[in-house]
Image: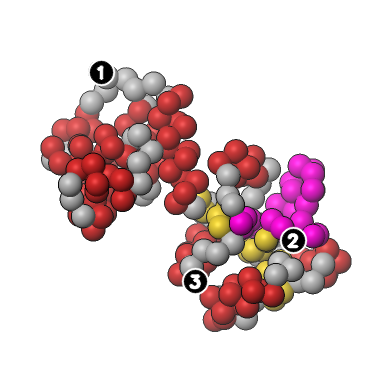
Amino acid sequence: MTILLATSSLYLCQRWTEALADDDPVVVDDGDHLDRQLAGEAPTVPLLLDLAWPHAPRSDAEWQALARRCRPLVLADAPQEQQGLHLFGLGVRGYGHTLSPAVMLRLMVDTVLNDGVWVGAALMAQMIGTLSRVIPEKPTVDGWRDALSVREQEVVEQLLTGASNKLIAREMGISERTVKAHLSAVFEKLDVSDRLQLLLKVRS
């Protein structure tokens, strides 16, 4: 499977190419080059696209057209919740930071190749904070608590405020590793795979 990279930054180009070296990614120079590459590919090909790339789509219609031809993973220097949500609505399959570590870039691509959608940790935390405010909790639906220990319930309550693992650890006086262990147990017990699914399950 071809992986396409679209950025005018030599630093990002090198960084992304090294991270995805096993797949021999192709760097596209401009819009015409991208068109030629996509012409011979299935619409499932991942495209890592630097939002600052001069040839990036500029209108909603252009983003939608691109999303029909490939699976765009949009990377920004300063990811913003509203921007990310807007792009997801236009069909992009991932949104994150341009300087995401190599292992994260690999996960992004693998997620998209497996028909998933990638939401970066920072955006996920912002979305959870927003949804926690707009989705009212139903106090009569507390079945989820029965499956969890008291400590796990406390972690969930902190998470529902949009707190990061570091903040949860500080508030509860435990290590981040312990927070991650609690969350892994919570995800397994409640049959969810991430924080967003957990929020929707608890608040539904």
Which type of secondary structure does the marked residue at label 1 adopt?
Answer: loop
Residue appearing at x 35%, y 46% in the figure: 164
Residue 161 in the image, given as x and y percentages of width and height:
35, 34
Residue picked out by circle 1: 140
Residue 41 in the image, given as x and y percentages of width and height:
73, 68
Q: Amino acid at mark 3?
A: Ala
| CB-based contact (under 8 Å), mark 1 and mark 2 | no
Q: Amino acid at mark 2?
A: Trp
Location of the C terminus by quadrant is top left
Label located before the other in sequence (1 or 3): 3
Residue 63 in the image, given as x and y percentages of width and height:
74, 48
Residue 131 seen by the camera: yes
How many residues crowd around disc 2 within 10 Å: few (fewer than 14), some, or many (20 or more)?
A: some
Residue picked out by circle 2: 53
Residue closest to the eye, 20 or 190: 20
Q: Quadrant of residue 99?
A: bottom right
Residue appearing at x 46%, y 45% in the figure: 124
Based on the picture, tell me whether residue 67 belongs to the magenta stretch. Answer: yes
In this rendering, the answer to whether 150 lies above or below 184 is above
